[in-house]
Amino acid sequence: MVTIHPKLSNELSQTVVSSTKSVKLKIKRSNPNVNSDEKFDEFVVPIEKWTTVLDSLLDVKSYLDHSVGIRYSCRQASCGSCGMKINGKLGLACFTKISELDSDTVTVEPMDNYPVVRDLVVNFDRMINNHKKIMPYVIREDSEIDAESGVREFLQSPKNVEKYIQFSNCIKCGLCNSACPTMAMDKSFVGPQALAQAYRYIADDRDKGKNKRLKIIDESHGIWRCHFAGSCSQVCPKGVDPAMGIQLLRGYLLGIRD
Amino acid sequence: MERETGAREGLKGWLHPGKIGKFGIERLAWLLMRLTGLGLLAYFIGHIYETSHILDGKAVWDKSLEMTQTTEGHLFLALVIGMCVFHTGNGIRLLIAQMGYGIGKAERPDYPYKPQSINMKGKACIYATLGMAALAMWYGMAVMFT
């Protein structure tokens, strides 16, 4: 059944000629807590040039079906909450304009390679656990805060910042893990997100935890399971390029890089 | 409790044609690398089995060789040649890339973000490898069928 947005249905009933465009939004619905059924619900929603997929989903939630399950927060591609498959392509709902999709129908589905919680919401436990596993923080024995000399900083040159700044853009949206073909088959693979973050901290010259991290990723389901399909980099909405980080990370294990 | 089924795409994540359309030639190269690797492994096992017939005498050996002297046998061997050339060529590309060469340099990214590791050099290498595999298959068939 297709549910039509009140703004559009009012216009239809009053036979007012409107310039408002509309699209059919197909949302994949499922609730594994109740049963294993999956279906697509269809909604007709108004759009403007600037309407994002997230705007339309919120429109559906506000006016047509409050029960649609989505996760979102910042609405500006900073929090990494609203990753999903949009017309089969992975992306952030808040960062994807409907007018740019060039389609009268927009199909939204939850990301692949994650357990579905409900509708478009997936469980990030595996990704977050792997992220924590690689110790995503600067490891030092000394402290930035020295009681005797007062507060000081671990100084770093702009040149050294450039070595890892790209990888620190990661917003943990999970799109890279969803695109990765190894993640599709290997339930223990650490994943491109965590590996790129391992590189981010190893390349940081303030960090002294290189050997600890290399030991964590140098195992049978670690870095060697990446075969450079590059799909992770193609879907990253922040330009992190995890595939590059992983290949550079290998350099440390192969002895090419110090 | 979250549904565990569907938590991984499984083989669909590898073989779905839509994936190649959306992720491009690099994803195709990745898939062909897996398939040719499995194909060559199967050929290797079959080859050991076939050549082991030499222990059963000349008559049995000659008979086992006849299997590859048919049109189907020639086409199969041409496929093996193609798999071998692609797997070798693409393997060298991956070896170089995985050592950190030809994948760009880490730097502050600017919008619109274009991943440096997915670049024209890599794409050209993949197309060249596919071309070499096709050429080797064509040459192999030319030799076998004349």
Image: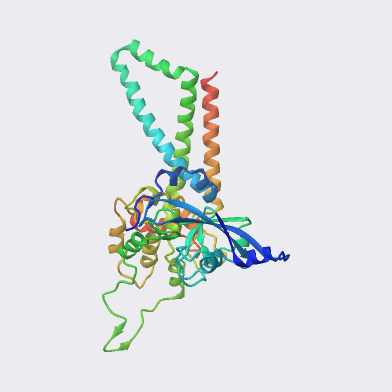
Viewer-proximal residue, B9 or A145? Answer: B9
For the N terminus of chain A, the image quarter is bottom right
Please provide percent x and percent y for residue A191.
Answer: 38, 56
Residue closest to the far right: A17
Residue B105 position (above or below residue A140): above
How many labels sit on residues?
0
Viewer-proximal residue, A99 or B104? Answer: A99
| In this rendering, position of residue B128 left or right of residue A69 | right
Residue B115 position (above or below residue B59): below
Please provide percent x and percent y for residue A243.
Answer: 44, 56
Residue A136 position (above or below residue A31): below
Asked whether residue A230 is in view, the answer is no
Q: Residue drawn at (60%, 66%), measured in percent from left and top? A: A6
Please provide percent x and percent y for residue B113.
Answer: 54, 63
Q: Residue drawn at (36%, 26%), measured in percent from left and top? A: B46
How is this picture coloured?
rainbow
Asked whether residue B29 is in view, the answer is yes
For the C terminus of chain A, the image quarter is bottom left
Viewer-proximal residue, B18 or A14? Answer: A14
